[in-house]
Image (cartoon, rainbow, N blue to C red):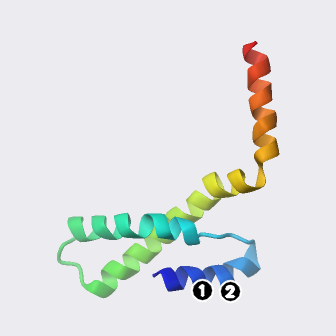
């Protein structure tokens, strides 16, 4: 699964829009896989791995766009926003 995330990051996604879901895949793959096995105990291994890959990829994509990318690319914007909020409070 991690090899797929690395391959996807280096080849497919990096050519599209520089989306890097590898850290999100790292964070969410085990919990998602554990939940799938917990709630669907009779699921075959290929189905469980495919479902884990799909769901963890989705969570990784959301994590990249809502958390990681803004934190990496926007520290100045965050500081501006914090300054504006502080100005409103004062």
Q: Which residue is mark 2?
A: 11
Q: CA distance from mark 1 to mark 2?
A: 6 Å
Q: Position of residue 90 (x, y in %)?
A: 76, 12
Q: Residue at x 52, y 84 (%)?
A: 4
Left/right of residue 11 with respect to residue 83 in the rendered view? left
Which quadrant: the N terminus? bottom left
Rate crowding at label 1 as few (under 14), some (14 to 19) or many (20 or more) other CA atoms within 10 Å: some
Q: Position of residue 55 (x, y in %)?
A: 44, 69
Q: Position of residue 37 (x, y in %)?
A: 24, 71
Q: Find residue 42 and report its image quarter.
A: bottom left
Q: Residue at x 64, y 79 (%)?
A: 9
Q: Residue at x 44, y 76 (%)?
A: 53
**Element type at mark 2:** helix
Q: Are marks 1 and 2 in contact (CB under 8 Å)?
A: yes
Q: Which residue is mark 1?
A: 7
Rate crowding at label 2 as few (under 14), some (14 to 19) or many (20 or more) other CA atoms within 10 Å: few
Q: Residue at x 77, y 33 (%)?
A: 81
Q: Is residue 46 above or below residue 9?
A: below
Q: Find residue 22 and report its image quarter.
A: bottom right
Q: Find residue 86 and report its image quarter.
A: top right
Left/right of residue 75 with respect to residue 11 in the rendered view? right
Q: Is residue 89 above or below residue 8?
A: above
């Amino acid at each position: 699964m991690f090899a797929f995330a690395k391959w996807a990051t280096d080849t497919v996604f990096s050519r599209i829009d520089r989306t890097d879901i590898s850290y999100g895949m790292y964070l969410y793959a085990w919990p998602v896989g554990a939940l799938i096995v917990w709630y669907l105990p009779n699921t075959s291994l290929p189905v469980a791995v495919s479902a884990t890959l799909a769901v963890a990829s989705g969570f990784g994509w959301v994590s990249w766009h809502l958390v990681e990318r803004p934190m990496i690319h926007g520290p100045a914007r965050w500081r501006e926003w914090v300054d504006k909020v502080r100005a409103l409070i004062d």
